[in-house]
Amino acid sequence: MVSIRPSGSDGVVLTVRPFMTFGRLDAGRFFMLRGDEESSPAIPRPFSLYRQGDSGNLEFLIKVIGPGTEALAQSRVGEEIVMIGPLGRGWPELTQDGKPLIMLAGGIGSAPFYIALQQALAGTDQRPAVDPGQLHLIYGGRNKGLLYDIEKFEELGIAVTPCTDDGSFGFHGNVVQALEDHWRQSRFPSEVRLWTCGPEPMMRAVVKVAEDRDLQCWFSLETYMGCGVGICNGCAVLTCKEGSLGSWPVAKCCVDGPVFAARDVQLT
């Protein structure tokens, strides 16, 4: 472990240097992490890759909510942690196709978005960089302290709409209300792409908007996992018969996701 710093009212950003070097990792993939001491739970927990540094370091944005995350948050510089990955399937590749991308994050659900934005803005030899004007993050939390690292997102140079349930910062309301307000104010065109990650009630509301407006929509599930590699079947999600995964009644979040097209699986 290289460093740890506080983020928001109850989060940390954990920076680790893996023993092996990774190439460019797809945004939206995850790692299973656990502390290496006896006080850590035996089963690692899944965490989205937050950022990938040029030096090979990997960063994870972690909300401290239980023994597993507490153990990681109490890690000391120089200690080893257990890290399994990269795992899963991430976001679809972003292209400059004229449809703005609206990312809707709730609380710690912002974690898989930073690297996606970073990669889109940088581009590759095969794909030109996406215009920052095509990217917008609507980031919501109960209060300002739950908008983790929001200043880091603002530093990327994209439009960021903060919103809080208590009105302590930014738009007073939730992310869907903020999205609808942007449409009312004609700040967004009628046809956009939607990505979302956060509490499932929030994501269900985003998917409902996408269905009502016939918009493309993807979400990243924060499902509990046991193994992360498709063996334990602990992260099964129901598929939609008409979707691309509908030939089987369930999909495994860890290997078929955690990012899914809204038309492919059901949010319960």
Image (cartoon, grey):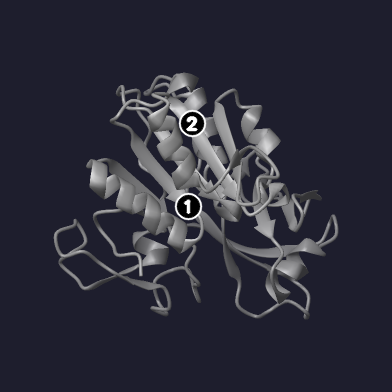
- Where is residue 75 drawn, in percent x and y? 81, 63
Number of numbered tags placed on the structure image: 2
Amino acid residing under circle 2: His
Picture residue at 38% right of the left edge, 50% below the top: 206
Residue 113 shows up from this direction: yes
Which label belongs to residue 34?
A: none
Foreground of the two, 116 or 26: 116
Residue 19 shows up from this direction: no
- Where is residue 232 drawn, in percent x and y? 42, 80
Foreground of the two, 205 or 73: 205
Picture residue at 56% right of the left edge, 34% below the top: 161
Foreground of the two, 102 or 114: 102
- Asked if 188 appears above or below 261 in the picture, the reply is above
Q: Reading the chain from its start, which is encountered first: label 2 or label 1?
A: 2
193 with respect to 8 (left or right): left
Mark 1 crowdedness (10 Å alpha carbons): few <14, some 14-19, many ≥20: many
- Asked if 104 appears above or below 182 in the picture, the reply is below
Picture residue at 42% right of the left edge, 21% below the top: 125
Picture residue at 39% right of the left edge, 71% below the top: 230
Circles 2 and 1: CB atoms closer than 8 Å: no
67 with respect to 99 (left or right): right
- Where is residue 233 drawn, in percent x and y? 38, 78
Question: Is disc 2 placed on a helix, strand or loop?
Answer: strand
Mark 2 crowdedness (10 Å alpha carbons): few <14, some 14-19, many ≥20: many
Amino acid residing under circle 1: Cys
Say which quarter of the image contains residue 77.
bottom right
Which label belongs to residue 197?
A: 1
- Where is residue 250 drawn, in percent x and y? 27, 72
Which label belongs to residue 136?
A: 2
Q: Quadrant of the C terminus?
A: bottom left
